[in-house]
Every structure is written in structure tokens, then in C-alpha cells.
Image (cartoon, helix red, strand yellow):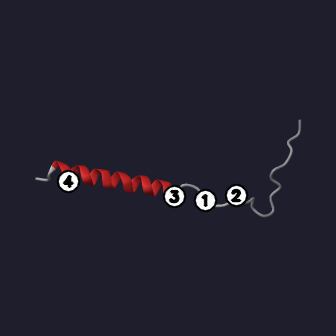
């Protein structure tokens, strides 16, 4: 039988790894660039 302290340690460790993984995969670094050959942004007709 596992000790309650060990279960809590593993639960916190898994939660921290999940948060770290989510934050490290969050977005792209640098300014966004439009694809070549596009006319964005453009004015829409009234």
C-alpha cells in the first residue's frame, strides 16, 4: 500500500509537469508574418 504522502507527491509532480508542458507550448515566438502572395490586411467595401 502506498503512503498518502507519496501519492500526494506524485499527484503534484504530474500536475506541475502538465502545467509546464502547456506553458512551454503556448504560442509562437516573434511577430506573426503574413504568407507570401496575400493581400491581407485590406479595406472592405462599405
Front-most of residues 12 and 36? 12
How far is the residue under mark 4 from the one under mark 3? 29 Å
How far is the residue under mark 1 from the one under mark 4? 37 Å
Q: Residues within 10 Å of mark 3 (few under 14, many from 20)?
A: few
Q: List the residue tagged with mark 1.
A: 28
Name the spot of residue 43 as percent of width and height, x first: 86, 44
Q: Secondary structure at mark 2?
A: loop
Residue 17 falls in which quadrant of the image? bottom left
Instruction: Report the side of 2 relative to 41 (left or right).
Output: left
How far is the residue under mark 4 from the one under mark 2? 45 Å
Q: List the residue tagged with mark 3.
A: 25
Name the spot of residue 44 as percent of width and height, x first: 85, 42
Q: Secondary structure at mark 1?
A: loop
Instruction: Report the side of 35 relative to 8 (left or right).
Output: right
First in sequence: mark 1 or mark 4?
4
Name the spot of residue 16 as percent of width and height, x first: 37, 53
Q: Residues within 10 Å of mark 4 (few under 14, many from 20)?
A: few
How far is the residue under mark 1 from the one under mark 3? 8 Å
Name the spot of residue 1 as percent of width and height, x first: 10, 53
Residue at the location (61% across, 59% down)?
Answer: 28
Q: List the residue tagged with mark 4.
A: 6
Residue at the location (14% across, 53% down)?
Answer: 2
Q: Residues within 10 Å of mark 1 (few under 14, many from 20)?
A: few
Q: Residues within 10 Å of mark 2 (few under 14, many from 20)?
A: few
Instruction: Report the side of 44 relative to 1 (left or right).
Output: right
User: Can you tell which mark lies on residue 32?
Assistant: 2
Amino acid at each position: 500500500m502506498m503512503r498518502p504522502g507519496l501519492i500526494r507527491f506524485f499527484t503534484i509532480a504530474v500536475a506541475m509537469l502538465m502545467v509546464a508542458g502547456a506553458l512551454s507550448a503556448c504560442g509562437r515566438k516573434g511577430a506573426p508574418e503574413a504568407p507570401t502572395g496575400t493581400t491581407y490586411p485590406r479595406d472592405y467595401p462599405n
